[in-house]
């Protein structure tokens, strides 16, 4: 992956950290961001390969603009992949029914998980390579109502809508990756290994058919069928 640059948000933990690790292992230059500087630095220090830590809060479009400019500065051909993993869940997973959710929790969840995705894609646009791919992790709660997931489920549905909007408005590949339930802080440690999600993201960024990904949702089943 000579001269391949991937930007990963939310890279201090969970899926984001696993995705950064996977791309770095394949020889890509990775620019990893998160809003917790200490956690980001610790994660990046544990990854072998060319990884640069850039502190950025996806809720702040100026932070995201600076992130993308920094990532593009050392990338002659533009950014090859952007994986928007930054996300929050206020409360215990599955125990935040929408009727009882605080306005502050609702607002911050959408600001991070939806507006943050919008800012990540929008600020990446001037710096993307012609064949770049933008990926947004999501889950089944975005498409099938599940009790107790409140604004998190709402935010994932909205983030998928953002993806579809960009996909129809751009001559670039923008898609959703759904790895299922992954063991992260957002799921209370329940689910499959984040490395499985990273494998899916790597395949979607490099080998998945563009027409199957653009404006669509690809999952682990698609990845395993294609690589069996």
Image (cartoon, rainbow, N blue to C red):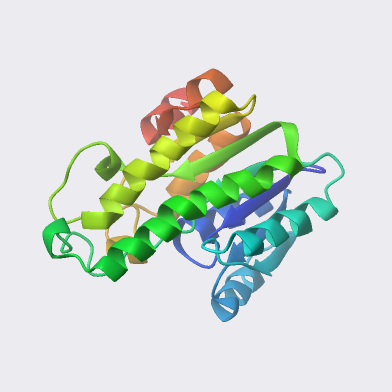
Decide: is 25 above or below 101: above
**From this viewpoint, is residue 179 visible?**
no
Q: Say which residue appears at 16% left-offset and 46% top-offset.
A: 146
Report whether 201 appears left or right of 7.
left
State the image coordinates of residue 78 (x, y, percent, origin top left): 79, 41
Q: Say which residue appears at 76% left-offset and 55% top-offset.
A: 69
Report whether 132 appears left or right of 201.
right
Q: Quadrant of residue 193?
A: bottom left
Q: Say which residue appears at 55% left-offset and 71% top-offset.
A: 35
Q: Quadrant of residue 188?
A: bottom left
User: In front: 166, or 54?
Assistant: 166
**From this viewpoint, is residue 182 visible?**
yes
State the image coordinates of residue 104 (x, y, percent, origin top left): 30, 70
User: In front: 51, or 56?
Assistant: 56
Report whether 150 appears left or right of 182.
left
State the image coordinates of residue 140 (x, y, percent, origin top left): 28, 40
Q: Say which residue appears at 18% left-offset and 63% top-offset.
A: 96
View extreme (top): residue: 211
User: In front: 93, or 1?
Assistant: 93
**The N terminus lies in which quarter of the figure?**
top right
Disc tally is 0
State the image coordinates of residue 131 (x, y, percent, origin top left): 71, 29
Report whether 89 appears left or right of 227.
left
């Amino acid at each position: 992956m000579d001269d391949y640059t991937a930007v990963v948000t939310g890279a201090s933990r969970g899926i984001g950290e696993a995705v950064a690790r996977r791309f770095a292992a394949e020889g890509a230059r990775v620019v990893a961001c998160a809003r917790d500087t200490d956690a980001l630095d610790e994660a990046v220090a544990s990854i072998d390969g060319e990884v640069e830590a850039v502190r950025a809060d996806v809720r702040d479009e100026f932070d995201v603009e600076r992130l993308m400019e920094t990532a593009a500065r050392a990338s002659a051909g533009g950014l090859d992949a952007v994986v928007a993993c930054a996300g929050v869940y206020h409360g215990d997973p599955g125990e935040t029914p929408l009727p009882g959710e605080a306005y502050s929790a609702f607002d911050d969840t959408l600001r991070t998980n939806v507006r943050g995705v919008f800012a990540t894609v929008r600020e990446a646009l001037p710096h993307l390579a012609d064949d770049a791919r933008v990926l947004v992790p999501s889950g089944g709660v975005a498409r099938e109502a599940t009790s107790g997931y409140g604004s998190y489920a709402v935010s994932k549905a909205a983030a998928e809508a953002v993806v579809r909007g960009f996909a129809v408005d751009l001559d670039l590949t923008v898609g959703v990756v759904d790895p299922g339930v992954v063991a992260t802080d957002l799921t209370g440690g329940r689910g499959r290994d984040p490395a499985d999600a990273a494998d899916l993201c790597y395949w979607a960024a490099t080998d998945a058919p563009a027409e199957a990904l653009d404006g669509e949702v690809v999952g682990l089943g698609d990845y395993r069928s294609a690589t069996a």
